[in-house]
Image (cartoon, rainbow, N blue to C red):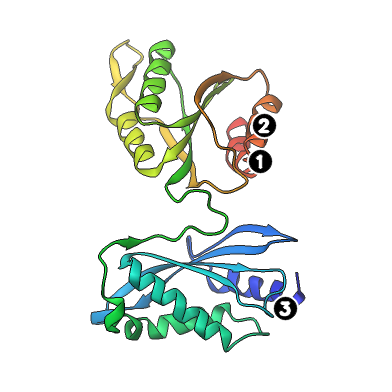
Amino acid sequence: MAESVREELSALAAIFCGPHEWEVLSRSETDGTVFRIHTKAEGLMDVDIPLELVFHLPVNYPLCLPGISVNSEYLTRAQCVTVKEKLLEQAENLLSEPMVHELVLWIQQNLRYILNQPETGSGSEKCTFPTSTTVDDGLWITLLHLDHMRAKTKYVKTVEKWASDLRLTGRLMFMGKIILILLQGDKSNIKEYLILQKTSKVDVDSSGKKCKEKMISVLFETKVQTEHKRFLAFEVKEYSSLDELQKEFETAGLKKLFSEFVLGLVK
């Protein structure tokens, strides 16, 4: 990676330092760097439009154009396509120099003019453009942590049934007192699972009465990336050691996830 690109990435991380504004999705010596910026730009009627901009900087950037994808719940597919095209046109004028911040500033200042063009007003379908690191835009992975299971046998059968009914794959993992549920599938189905988990009487309290799950937390959720394993089934597994649990995560391409979210549960 060229020094100018390193400096640009460092500057961007400092500029977009708010919650969820900046996220590096992947780095590679052969494929370059992919990152996401969440920002807002003034649209029609002086309303701020949230934008998700994903940039792919190839290894020979800035001598070549970055890859760009645009997503917003407030824009149609036609509008997203036009915004992307306009950004690439602008990028052609900035070749050979770091340009990402310039492009973000440009779209913040010009989005309302782009949306005012007649050809961008057609089409009602919301747009979502998968990035180069996304396997399937609808496929997500979520990691849940449960504090305990009193009625374990019934609880496990219920979780297996929900996963099957909602076509979710992954793992229900036990290691000592740690209980984790790793779900992979359609994002809407994962949301439905969480609703079931929080609203159904799935366990029993200390007196043996049926109760809802109140001690569940979502540790992590993201779109499935190319390095993530595609689980073929939902399995219940018990691990005798932390190393064994760690290997499960590493095999699934989730080593970073394990380090950031699971290790802290052991301390």
Residue placed at 48% from the left, 79% from the top?
87
Q: Residues within 10 Å of mark 2 (few under 14, many from 20)?
A: some
Q: Earlier in the sequence, mark 2 or mark 1?
A: 2
Query: Could you tell me the amino acid type at mark 1?
Result: Lys
Check if mark 2's residue and mark 1's residue have beta carbons within 8 Å: yes
Instruction: Please give the name of the residue rendered at 35% of the width and 33% of the height, measured from the top-left corner.
Output: 193
The residue under label 2 is: 246
In the image, residue 25 sits, relative to residue 37, either above or below, namely above
Dividing the picture into quarters, in which one does residue 177 lie?
top right
> Could you say whether the residue bearing mark 1 is in a helix, strand or loop?
helix
Check the image and report above or below for 204 versus 143: above
From this viewpoint, which residue is outermost toward the left? 45
Residue occupied by mark 1: 255
Rendered location of residue 227, percent (x, y): 63, 46
Image vertical order of residue 123 relative to residue 211, above or below: below
- The kind of secondary structure element at disc 2 is helix
Q: Quadrant of the C terminus?
A: top right
The mark that comes first in sequence, 3 or 1, is 3
Callout 3–callout 1 Cβ contact below 8 Å:
no
Q: Nearer the viewer, residue 138 or 20?
A: 138
* Left or right relative to 161: residue 60: right
| Coordinates of residue 99 in the picture (x, y in percent) | 59, 81
Residue nearest the viewer, comparing 68 with 11: 68
Query: Label 3: which residue?
Result: 4
| Left or right, 231 with reference to 9 | left
Image position of 248 (left or right of 48): right
Q: Nearer the viewer, residue 247 or 119?
A: 119
**Residue flagged by tag 2: what amino acid is it?**
Gln
Please name the residue shown 63% across and 20% down the image.
239
Q: Is residue 130 above or below residue 240?
A: below
Q: Secondary structure at mark 3?
A: helix
